[in-house]
């Protein structure tokens, strides 16, 4: 009786939707806001992150997912499909699926040493597949202390013992090496224990970060677990005007879509403008999708990429004819790539679609101290912002093409009869992404032009970008850099801006933030055009109709469900409600607490990054004591945190907590402070993974952040850290949190995601490392 009603309502909804023709495209000048409620958070992912307690779970990996009818896949899903292990026959993976992933390559850098420690501590003695692993030394290369040199020697010895590819300090930054040596290959999965693994997406490889414990697991087993994130499509339309670069594209995206629109998403770039963006610029854009909040930034395998690969193969064949057939870049290998080219299927599902019209873009600068603040250079130049430091380096913009652009700024100044040297109040530092890129810049003459202009050379490596070595921004100074991350106190104690190499060079030349004057504004362009949708009005109009149809059908389904409930006599008595609540109780493993509670200490800020939680200068010191970790916890965010927060407190903070790098100490430093639980509006994905792996409890409660901000908004100057007097209780068994807003204040509760038994087991054992070790011992 009800089914015909449902069908007629759906048909009516369909007819109504066909009358709608309102495009969903929205445009904005410099800014687009989206409701927080639409963002994908990490809490639900934790509910099924592990499988050992599930029925019929296969050993050695995540449970096989039952086969489903073939459906269109995104490029991300297709690449994961190739590297997923244990799938049911015919199964097509989709966003949201958990898979056991066998990446083609796994790179670790200076953190190879702690990964080695974890590898041996879990009982592993042999690397599963030495060809899968790449070790590079790139972060602390200026540190010539015996402690650091000994660590480097031990890493090299480990690589030789196990037959692993190894690149010593000075050879270059790991991400650049992964690309130029062919380890990151289009259509494959390449991971690294570093947050900028997204870089590989610039050449069509699915690059995504893992944490140290995951890397140790890959060394030992060749595999790790992975949930396919929601996938966002970003269409780049139009053509970049002269004087606008890939760096401007990603700085604009970070600053204009600055409300976490793609937080914890995989990004796929598309659109008509893609074909005009060179590979070096694609690498830059993909690299900084990390700062955009994404877990990958994937460009298509297209003609531009094929041409780049062919050029490398031809060059390799000319320089080493005897080894040309066996090198990483060969025409035969490229032929196979193109003949079996992966592309997104028509009709593939994306969580959201955004667009940026490249033709409307001009040179942009990010900062100070945030990538979410982006300003056109034409608006900053009149402000006469004096600088003292400038940097052209990093895996973002340390390639030969970047040094060529910077050198041309000084060449043009010389041709025009102007001073062609760095301003006497500025120090300009240059470091190549790799020795190969540096040699190319030397051969072209660009490197010498920069040195003659007064630039100071640093060894190929991360250096100032991560706040290590000489040349950091001093307190009270302003710096501008072609790197990727300008978090507060990351590159030093002053203010940091980000820009393209040519803007950095022009700023160093003029002594203030300035452009080289190369931008040619297209006629009729007055603002940056961005928005939701594809950027194609007709396509967006069709999508709008489809969405309206889906909405009306959903409303009809709801009406029918209500009717069925009324006809069926829905139970509303308290006994039924109690029974329903009882059925949602979570099983608690023996020894695991049923509830956690403590006083709320509130750090009222969004986007507190891992540098803020645990300063980068300590990250590669492997002998930092637990007491010292507790002492420096959160010091880059608030130096008074250590004296305000107490053992047993519940740390509550804003949205996107733990964004930034993959350092595990961001989680372990909080534990060292004896804070067992962190509550946030949302978490960065890497931090969430590190928290599980290191037995730090986390839960997302956006309402709590809203209530705290409403309550304390009128108290004058806002402290960075405050004791609230509020009490927080997480009832793990009932999957519920209870908040008491101060003595005699309101008490309210909210349901949260269940904590699965295996997550309980991992946390109870003290983290994933000890859990894996226990499982190895049991077997």
Image (cartoon, rainbow, N blue to C red):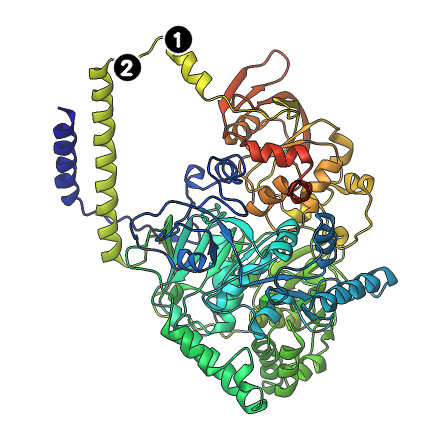
Front one among 643 and 146: 146
Name above or below for residue 672 compared with residue 405. above
Q: Secondary structure at mark 2?
A: loop
Tell me if 458 is positioned left or right of 132 in this view: right
How far is the residue under mark 2 from the one under mark 1? 13 Å
User: What percent of the width, then of the height, locates residue 75?
Assistant: 39, 60
At horizontal 79% and vertical 52% (from top left) the residue drawn is: 622
Name above or below for residue 571 compared with residue 445. above
Name above or below for residue 635 compared with residue 358. above
Location of residue 581 (image quadrant): top left
The 10 Å Cα crowd at callout 1, few under 14, some 14 to 19, many 20 or more, is few
Q: Residue furthest front?
A: 779
Which of the two discs, 2 and 1, labels the residue nearer the N terminus? 2
At horizontal 49% and vertical 81% (from top left) the residue drawn is: 330
At horizontal 47% and vertical 63% (from top left) the residue drawn is: 249
At horizontal 23% and vertical 42% (from top left) the residue drawn is: 548
Front one among 25 and 284: 284
User: What percent of the width, then of the height, locates residue 402?
Assistant: 58, 74
User: What percent of the width, then of the height, locates residue 326?
Assistant: 55, 82
Q: Which mark is residue 113?
A: none
Would you name the residue on which mark 2 appears? 570
Front one among 619 and 766: 766
Location of residue 560 (image quadrant): top left
User: What percent of the width, then of the height, locates residue 390?
Assistant: 67, 66
Would you name the residue on which mark 1 appears? 575
Name above or below for residue 353 compared with residue 238. above
Quadrant occupied by the N terminus: top left
Location of residue 8 (image quadrant): top left
Tell me if 459 is positioned left or right of 38 in this view: right
The 10 Å Cα crowd at callout 2, few under 14, some 14 to 19, many 20 or more, is few
Q: Secondary structure at mark 1?
A: helix
């Amino acid at each position: 009786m009800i089914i015909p009603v449902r069908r007629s309502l759906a048909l009516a909804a369909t007819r109504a939707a066909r009358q709608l023709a309102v495009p969903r495209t929205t445009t904005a000048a410099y800014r687009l806001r989206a409701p927080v409620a639409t963002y994908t958070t990490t809490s639900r992912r934790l509910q099924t992150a592990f499988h050992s307690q599930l029925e019929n779970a296969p050993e050695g990996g995540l449970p096989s997912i039952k086969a489903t009818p073939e459906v269109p896949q995104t490029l991300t899903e297709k690449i994961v499909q190739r590297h997923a292990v244990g799938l049911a026959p015919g199964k097509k993976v989709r966003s949201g699926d958990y898979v056991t992933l066998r990446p083609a390559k796994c790179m670790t850098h200076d953190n190879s040493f702690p990964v080695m420690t974890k590898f041996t501590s879990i009982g592993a003695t042999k690397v599963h597949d030495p060809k899968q692993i790449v070790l590079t030394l790139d972060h602390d290369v200026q540190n010539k202390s015996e402690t650091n040199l000994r660590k480097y020697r031990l890493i090299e010895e480990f690589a030789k013992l196990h037959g692993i590819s190894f690149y010593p300090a000075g050879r270059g930054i790991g991400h650049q090496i992964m690309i130029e040596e062919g380890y990151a290959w289009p259509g494959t999965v390449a991971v690294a224990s570093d947050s900028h693994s997204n870089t590989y997406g610039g050449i069509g490889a699915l690059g995504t970060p893992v944490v140290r414990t995951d890397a140790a697991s890959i060394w030992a087993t060749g595999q790790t677990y992975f949930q396919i994130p929601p996938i966002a499509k970003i269409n780049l339309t139009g053509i970049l005007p002269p004087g606008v670069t890939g760096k401007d594209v990603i700085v604009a995206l970070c600053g204009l879509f600055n409300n976490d629109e793609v937080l914890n998403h995989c990004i796929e770039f598309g659109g008509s403008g893609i074909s005009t963006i060179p590979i070096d610029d694609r690498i830059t854009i993909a690299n900084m999708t990390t700062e955009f909040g994404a877990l990958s930034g994937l460009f298509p395998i297209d003609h531009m990429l094929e041409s780049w690969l062919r050029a490398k193969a031809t060059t390799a064949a000319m320089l080493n004819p005897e080894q040309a057939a066996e090198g990483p870049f060969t025409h035969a290998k490229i032929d196979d790539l193109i003949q079996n080219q992966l592309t997104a299927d028509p009709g593939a599902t994306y969580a959201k679609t955004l667009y940026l019209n490249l033709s409307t873009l001009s040179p942009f600068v990010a900062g100070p101290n945030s990538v979410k603040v982006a300003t056109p250079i034409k608006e900053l130049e009149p402000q006469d912002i004096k600088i003292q430091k400038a940097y052209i380096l990093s895996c973002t913009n340390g390639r030969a093409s970047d040094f060529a652009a910077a050198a041309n700024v000084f060449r043009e100044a010389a041709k025009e009869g102007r001073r062609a040297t760095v301003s006497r109040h500025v120090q300009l530092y240059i470091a190549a992404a790799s020795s190969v890129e540096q040699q190319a810049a030397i051969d072209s003459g660009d490197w010498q032009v920069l040195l003659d202009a007064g630039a100071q050379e640093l060894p190929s490596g991360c250096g100032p970008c991560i706040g290590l070595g000489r040349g950091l921004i001093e307190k009270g100074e302003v710096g501008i850099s072609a790197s990727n991350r300008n978090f507060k106190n990351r590159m030093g104690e002053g203010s940091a801006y980000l820009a393209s190499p040519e803007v950095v060079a022009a700023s160093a030349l003029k002594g203030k933030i300035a452009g080289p004057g190369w931008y040619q504004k297209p006629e009729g362009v007055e603002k940056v055009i961005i928005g939701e949708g594809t950027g194609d009005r007709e396509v967006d109009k069709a999508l709008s109709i489809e969405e309206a149809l889906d909405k009306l059908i959903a409303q009809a389904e709801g009406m029918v469900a209500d009717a069925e409930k009324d006809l069926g006599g829905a139970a509303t008595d308290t006994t039924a409600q109690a029974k329903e609540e009882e059925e949602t109780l979570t099983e608690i493993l023996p020894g695991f607490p049923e509830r956690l509670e403590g006083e709320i200490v509130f750090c009222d800020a969004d986007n507190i990054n891992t540098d803020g939680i645990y300063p980068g200068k300590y990250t590669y010191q492997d002998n930092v004591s637990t007491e010292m970790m507790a002492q420096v916890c959160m010091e880059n965010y608030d130096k008074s945190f250590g004296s305000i927060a107490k053992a047993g407190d519940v740390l509550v903070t804003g949205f996107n907590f733990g964004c930034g790098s993959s350092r595990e100490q961001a989680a372990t430093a909080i534990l060292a402070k004896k804070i067992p639980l962190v509550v946030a509006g949302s978490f960065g994905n890497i931090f969430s993974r590190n928290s599980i792996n290191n037995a730090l409890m986390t839960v997302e409660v956006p309402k709590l952040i809203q209530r705290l901000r409403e309550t304390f908004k009128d108290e004058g100057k806002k402290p960075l850290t405050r004791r609230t007097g509020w009490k927080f209780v997480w009832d793990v068994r009932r999957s519920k949190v209870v908040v008491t807003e101060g003595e005699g204040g309101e008490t309210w509760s909210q349901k949260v995601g269940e904590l699965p038994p295996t997550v309980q087991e991992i946390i109870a054992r003290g983290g994933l490392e000890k859990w894996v070790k226990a499982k190895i011992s049991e077997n």
